[in-house]
Image (spheres, helix red, strand yellow):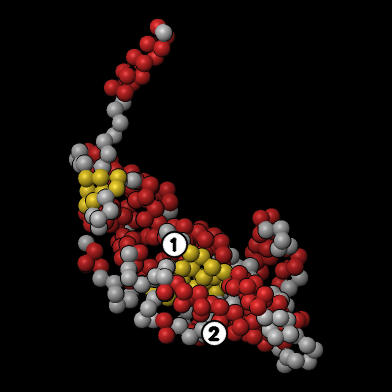
Amino acid sequence: SELLGLLDQSLFEGQKLAPQAPEILLRGSGRDRPFSKGLLSQTQLAAALDPDDAFEIARDIERELLVKQATEIDRGELRRLTHEMVARRSGAAAADRYLVWRHYEDASRPVILLLGGAAGVGKTSIALEVAHRLGIGRVLSTDSIRQIMRLMLSPDLAPALHGSSFDAYTHFPPGSLGEDPLLESFRAQTATVSVGVRASIERAIDENASTIIDGVALFPGAIDLAPYAEHADIVFLVVATLERDTYAARFTRREKDESQRPAHQYLEHLDEILQIQDQFLDAAEREGIPIVVNDGFDQAVMLVIRHLTETLAKRPGFDRSALL
């Protein structure tokens, strides 16, 4: 009992020596909650900041509030303070990207990001990381859409669905394709899967749910996006890997995490995959769609976020001055 008494006394004295930081309440929009530097740093990732830099800024803001002995802060004031701190640390362009996503995150219609590209360029990995950094809860792959459609349509009705983009021609009856079976079967697959992509876009609009869709079936010009312009902010990007050796190495690395996708299956068809990528690059240039070169994962993620926020900043609904 004497030992327990000494322990209680030491704990009490420790609490007096190191008092807990007072809680700061974040007010506004009818959703008051405690201030969190973790959540604040998360919101800055839309500015395409390095996560460590974002956390440092959030920690500096918390320290400034504690020095001022603030017990509460309005959401708008916190946004202004964060914008000022990001501009000071990372420049005006980064600060404006932060504001753009703060606006579109609470908009009355969804943001839909489409990431197209040939097999194996890293679209899904990039999509998942961008979704994490922007707080987007819905990520879809055209591979999943194609798998569902396979169950509905037999190989006789839709042979293009029952192969990969680079070998779909092997599922067609002999002589049914023209002079370029590879590209003709790829276009047939894209046209069929685009039906499911359109349904996914319409569902996202109905539910006002910002969404990222990635996949090889997202070919520039294959889907008419104009009918959705009044109901969603859609941004289309193409992901590419230009160096053959880098491309081949990615398949080998991917096999370690996805054993059901053996590297040799793709490496044996690397020439066909590169032909399809050339089609993506030509179509992207023709349609005016930005190309993100994935030579390094973190850099590619940053580029996607920058393209997205800078494109949204040019849309009629964005008013920078109203946010400050």
Residue at the disc numbered 2? 222
Residues tagged 2 and 1 counted as in contact (Cβ below 8 A): no
Q: Residue 45 location in percent, x, y?
A: 40, 56
Which amino acid, mark 2? Ala
Which amino acid, mark 1? Ile
Q: Earlier in the sequence, mark 2 or mark 1?
A: 1
Does 218 appear above or below 34? below
Is residue 156 visible in the rendered image? The answer is: yes
Does 171 appear above or below 26? below
Does 224 appear above or below 263? below
Which residue: 71% across, 76% down?
A: 163
Element type where label 2 sits in the image: loop
Which residue: 26% across, 42% down?
A: 24
Is residue 300 visible in the rendered image? The answer is: no
The residue mark sitting in front, 2 or 1, is 1
Does 283 appear above or below 144? below
Quadrant containing the N terminus is top left
Q: Residue 167 location in percent, x, y?
A: 73, 78
Which residue: 46% across, 68% down?
A: 211
Q: Residue 181 location in percent, x, y?
A: 72, 87
Depth order, front residue of 81/293? 81
Which residue: 53% across, 82% down?
A: 220
Residue at the disc numbered 1? 136
Element type where label 1 sits in the image: loop
Depth order, front residue of 141/252? 141
Count of marks placed on residues: 2
Q: Residue 82 location in percent, x, y?
A: 28, 53
Residue 108 position by quadrant = bottom left
